[in-house]
Image (cartoon, rainbow, N blue to C red):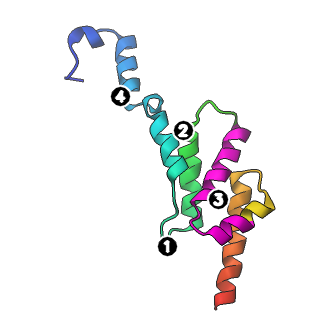
Amino acid sequence: MWDYNEADVNSVSKLIWKLRHRFGSTSQLEKYQMEAKCRCRKPSESLQHLHSDLCCLTALAFPKLEDKARKMMACDYFVDALNDPMLELKIREKAPQCLDAAYKEALNLEMWQQSIKE
């Protein structure tokens, strides 16, 4: 806070505003929204890690959005992030209504794919 002059932080409310502006998520909503939208599954990344990351990102990106709507957006972002067109198509055919349903479907499909390859 040493980079502010005394008048900028001479009251508790001004100090709180400055701290929220600098460290709070309100000024970073666009960043989180872009991260969620552009998220891609890395090679060897687990579905569980992708799921939890998108859960967190969508909560940070859309804090005031109704829970059901946020879960539907997270579901779309999750399917888009899978980086496997066939897996994406199969999950979209099932029309999951939330992130958890898409995650469960992806786990099942990936498990079946691995058992066929072995």
- Residue under pointer 1: 44
Q: CA distance from mark 2 to mark 1?
A: 26 Å
Q: CA distance from mark 4 to mark 3?
A: 33 Å
Q: Looking at the image, which residue is at 55% across and 68% down?
A: 46
Q: Please state which amino acid type lies under the numbered disc 3.
A: Val
Q: Is residue 42 left or right of residue 52?
A: left
- Residue under pointer 4: 22
Q: Please state which amino acid type lies under the numbered disc 2.
A: Ala
Q: Secondary structure at mark 3?
A: helix
**Looking at the image, is 114 positioned above or below residue 13?**
below
* Number of the front mark, 3 or 2: 3
Which tag, 4 or 2, sits closer to the chain's start? 4
Which tag, 1 or 3, sits closer to the chain's start? 1
**The label number, if any, that marks residue 61 in the structure image:** 2
Q: CA distance from mark 1 to mark 3?
A: 16 Å
**Neighbours of disc 4 within 10 Å: few (<14), some (14-19), many (20+):** few
Q: Please state which amino acid type lies under the numbered disc 4.
A: Arg
Residues in magenta? 67-90
- Residue 89 located within the stretch drawn in magenta: yes
* Number of the front mark, 4 or 2: 2
Q: Please state which amino acid type lies under the numbered disc 1.
A: Ser
**The label number, if any, that marks residue 79 in the structure image:** 3
Q: CA distance from mark 3 to mark 2?
A: 18 Å
